[in-house]
Image (tube, rainbow, N blue to C red):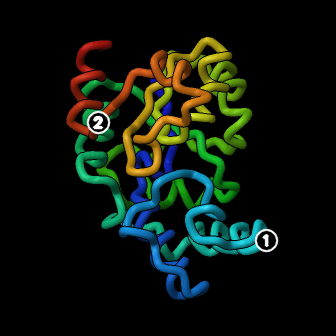
Amino acid sequence: MIGFDLDGTIYHMSPVIKYVAKVYFGKDTPNGIIPGYNLSEVYGLTEAQIRELIIKCQEEKWLTPDRLIPGAKEVLEYLVNHQGEPLIIVTARTQTDWVKNFLEVSLDVDPRKISVFHSRSINKGECLYKLGLEYFLDDYWEALLSVQQHGVQPLLFEQEWNLKLPSDRSHAFQMFERIKDWDHMKDFLVKVG
């Protein structure tokens, strides 16, 4: 079985972050690209401001079907409707009911096949292990280190912020299978059956 992260993997969070940074904090995104996970470095905001930015970005109003990453809808529906697998989401978001509602509205699948779990990024591996998952797709490479330590195969979904490898962690990236987009994800699902 496979599990998925939400933000940056299924849900296109990047435009929301850029919008909130500009409108609420007056910060432009350098070159229009978020080059890494450390948003305080990207935007020059304090840790308190970053927490506020994330809270604003996670408001329910942003969870709309048009924010699905291209190809996610078709592949997730294929997983559930054709492969008969459940859709398992493990997210750092605490409002799992909002996430479940978003997926129910966005996907043409039996809502009973959708399960959403909350787990902090550093604890995702433990959560996935308890759920009995074999694979996990996430855009956050540090979360995937925990995933790997718990015997779940990490799949790194490529995004603008995870393409540049930190030199002190480059060895870890060599162990992650990279998923370029949702077409690549479908090929992976077909391959593993």
Q: Is residue 45 above or below residue 4?
A: below
From the image, tell me which residue sits under label 1. 48
Q: For residue 122, which numbered disc appears in the image?
A: none
Callout 1 secondary element? helix
Q: Residues within 10 Å of mark 1 (few under 14, many from 20)?
A: few
Can residue 1 be seen? no
Where on the picture, by quarter, is residue 29? bottom left
- Residue 165: image location, x then y, percent: 48, 35
Q: Residue at x 27, y 39 (%)?
A: 182
Look at 52% across and 87% down and name the residue there: 23
Taking 182 as reference, is 11 above or below it?
below
Figure check: 158 above or below 185: below
Using the image as rendered, state which of residue 113 and residue 39 is in the foreground: 39
Q: Tell me which amino acid carries mark 2.
A: Lys
Q: Residue furthest right?
A: 48
Residue 159 appearing in the image: yes
The residue under the point 62% across, 34% down is 143
Question: For residue 141, which quarter of the picture?
Answer: top right
Q: CA distance from mark 1 to mark 2?
A: 33 Å
Q: Quadrant of the C terminus?
A: top left
Q: Earlier in the sequence, mark 1 or mark 2?
A: 1
Q: Nearer the viewer, residue 141 or 135?
A: 141
Seen in the image, is 12 located left or right of residue 72?
Answer: right
Residue assigned mark 2: 180
| Residue at 50 percent of width and 27 percent of height | 136
Tell me, yes or no, whether the two marked residues, 1 and 2, touch with CB atoms within 8 Å: no
**Percent from the top left, x then y, of residue 126?**
72, 24
Amino acid identity at mark 1: Ala
Q: Nearer the viewer, residue 97 or 180?
A: 180
Number of numbered discs = 2
| 61 over 74 or under it: above or below | below
- Where in the figure is residue 169, as x and y percent of width and height? 59, 27
